[in-house]
Amino acid sequence: MKTLIPMLPQAPIAAAALSLVLAGCATAQAPVPAATPAPAASASAPASVVSAPAARPAAPLPGALAPFAEIVREAKRADGYLPVWTRDDRTWLEIPSVLLDKPFFMASSVAGGTGEGRFWPGLTGRGDMVELKRVGNTVQLIARNTTIRAPAGTPLARALSESYSDSLLGAAPLAAAPHPLSKALLVDAAVLLGGDIFNAQLALEAQHRLPYALDRANSSFERVRATAAGTYFTLRQHFSVARLPTTVPNPAQAPNPPRSLPDVRSLFISLTYTLAPLPAEPLKTRAADARVGYFNTSFVDLGDDTQEGRRTHLIRRWRLEKADPAAAVSAPKEPIRV
């Protein structure tokens, strides 16, 4: 039996269709005016029941970040200055919101070398005052420019910040949406720290005159440790060269391959990165004297016109403090550790 549906004006049809959409009803029939009686159902025909589809969770928007808890599910958290999450071969760095755009100390050292050249275990590399900065859905590791300085809060300091650039050491996209309560950020530590921060490629090429390149796919973390005093990553990085040159135009530039490797085309270097907070009370500085053979560090202080060339030289010092300040001789509060 065919059901006859009366023709309706266009405006009522549009209004009725809109009301059906808003009510969540799904039906293929055109709406029937309320004044039109529905045809009587046959006694032998079963009643037809139209039900609304089951509600589905809203699909994530394209490019939306996964929830924080979903990414770290079944991962183990190590609390510290910068907390670390680990699961299987994945390592994530948690960045508390209060530490964004706040300076801290980052140092590097060789944990495992090649047995020759400049890569001996224990040798220190660069040390920087760095910041973690969020730019959209990316976290940048920025090395602050401390070579040119001026008194903080002065127009001169603002002019310097506009005239001299910082440096980008690493960057990583957010691995998850910010934590819903603490607003902490999560990034893949291998992406943020897995680049050539140590500048090992340049040192290898200068030493061996071969274009060794970083192979991030075959690099991995050896050790990760997080404490209140700092967060430490030991990264085993692979460097390789596709082939050795067969001819060299200038004999003075001939390759000098490492002699201690099974295959000179491939080598591993382990590097430790230390991320530590700056001391709450800065160490008292001591001016360097050119007549004394101290190791020193220098910077241009445009706010000080008493120094020649406005360059300040300071002695590199260890923070040795008495455990008992009242004693004439006392054990150190924190001994020097190498």
Image (cartoon, rainbow, N blue to C red):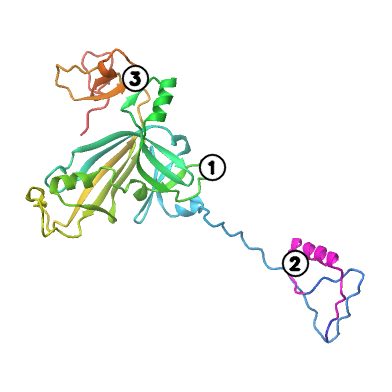
Q: Nearer the viewer, mark 1 or mark 2?
A: 2
Sequence order check: which comes first, mark 3 or mark 1?
1
Q: Is residue 270 left or right of residue 84?
A: left
Kindly identify which numbered label has been placed on residue 25: 2
Q: Quadrant of the C terminus?
A: top left
Q: Tell me the residue that label 3 is attached to.
A: 302
Q: Position of residue 7 (x, y in %)?
A: 87, 74
Q: Quadrant of the N terminus?
A: bottom right
Q: Amino acid at mark 3?
A: Leu
Marks counted in the figure total 3
Rendered residue at 19%/16% (across/down)? 289
Rendering quarter of residue 317: top left
Q: Position of residue 70 (x, y in %)?
A: 49, 54
Rendered residue at 37%/38% (across/down)? 142
Residue stretch rendered in magenta on the structure: 4-28
| Residue 286 visible in image | no
Q: Is residue 128 above or below residue 59?
A: above
Q: Nearer the viewer, mark 3 or mark 1?
A: 3
Q: Is residue 138 left or right of residue 207?
A: right
